[in-house]
Amino acid sequence: MRSYAVTRLGAPLEPMEAADPVPTGTEVLIEVLRCGVCHSDLHLQEGFYDLGGGKRLSLTERGVRLPLVMGHEVFGRLVAKGPDAPIGDDALGHDFVVFPWLGCGECEICRRGAENDCPKSSSIGVFRSGGYAEKCLVPHPRYLIDAEGIDPALAATYACSGLTAYSALRKAPVDRDRDWLLILGAGGVGFNGVQIARALGQRNIVVADIDPAKREAVLEAGASLAVDPSDPDAPARLQALEGGVAAAIDFVGASSTAEFGVAALRKTGTYVAVGLYGGDLSVSVPLLVLRAITVRGSYVGNLGELRELIELVKAGRVPPLPVETLPMDSVNEALDRLRAGKVKGRLVLAC
């Protein structure tokens, strides 16, 4: 089996050869057909998150081990199963989206279905080998979601890009008929956020992005308004919308976008941090109280939310976002393009 792994932090991925994994116990083996390339893979390749103020969070200190086969947006074919896997032989040969955000599976957080929030994460492509490979081992068939009828490349992106946007939108308390929702960042996840918000019935959506081409794209996708956050008049334009936006979802996660999002909130508004670009946020405690605002984070999403999202897509309520497919051996080119910001929509690798 060929895979592509991070063997040195900050260096290009290297090809590796190994025997095909053999599933044991409840494990199942997926032949990877498509695997999305995600911005968080850049952080994994570099080995840290920027915490702002010159501080870094080392991923190796969090338990990430090299060599690491990244890739958490996996779509593939079930080709083998362990002797205790609770799935019938008739499922062999069928294609599935893989839910990658695994926890310990035993704590109260996992038992209530929020494995993505488990403090003992074992996520695919982060703490265990992922989809930048010909085969991917999954610990249990419950993490396989039927995506019949969805384009394979598009289906792969829902495991992270789509799920992250969907879960963040569910955390934003808005009246979808009347309130204004601000989406910060019109990259792959932000663009998905606009489409999913529209599918959920959100009428008033404003998007902030410094790229005029991306602003134009989200307007075509259904956003009501698009602003340049570097425009000095942008904050006033947002405050003119019913005294500010009801919620701001930050798919960038930089200091500048966080400050812009919090400033745009109306009284009682909610800021949801999603992106991991890096930086920090300083919030005045008296103003936090006087404005009665909420600041919270949202990390990917849970298994139930992914199933809900896939059903929305199957029902035709979420339009397809732009996806470009590259061969798996072009993984370093894909990562370089993503790092340079030269991607419209999402990049997906094909075996």
Image (tube, helix red, strand yellow):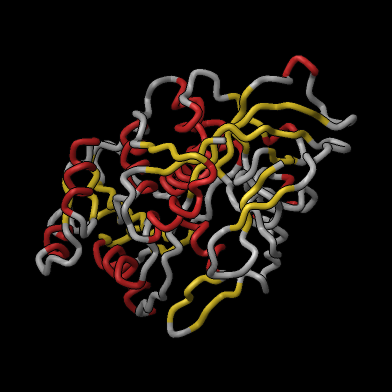
**In the image, is residue 142 above or below residue 41?**
above
Q: How many marks?
A: 0
Taking the image as shown, residue 97 lies to the left or right of residue 264, namely right
Q: Residue at x 38, y 54 (%)?
A: 337
Q: Residue furthest left?
A: 233
Q: Can residue 328 be seen at all in this image of the molecule?
A: yes
- Work out whether residue 2 or residue 167 is closer to the camera in this orientation and state it: 2
Residue 101: give x, y in percent of width and height.
63, 48
Q: Which residue lies furthest to the bottom in this view?
A: 54
**In the image, is residue 344 above or below residue 27?**
below
- Work out whether residue 4 or residue 285 is closer to the camera in this orientation and state it: 4
Residue 315: give x, y in percent of width and height.
43, 20
Taking the image as shown, residue 227 lies to the left or right of residue 174, namely left
Taking the image as shown, residue 343 lies to the left or right of residue 157, namely left
- For the N terminus, the image quarter is top right
- Work out whether residue 26 or residue 43 is closer to the camera in this orientation and state it: 43
- Work out whether residue 309 or residue 287 is closer to the camera in this orientation and state it: 309
Residue 41: give x, y in percent of width and height.
52, 57
Q: Can residue 115 be seen at all in this image of the molecule?
A: no
Residue 314: give x, y in percent of width and height.
46, 21
* Quadrant in which residue 260 is drawn: bottom left
Taking the image as shown, residue 330 lies to the left or right of residue 144, namely left
* Quadrant in which residue 117 is drawn: bottom right
- For the C terminus, the image quarter is top right
Q: Residue at x 72, y 60 (%)?
A: 120
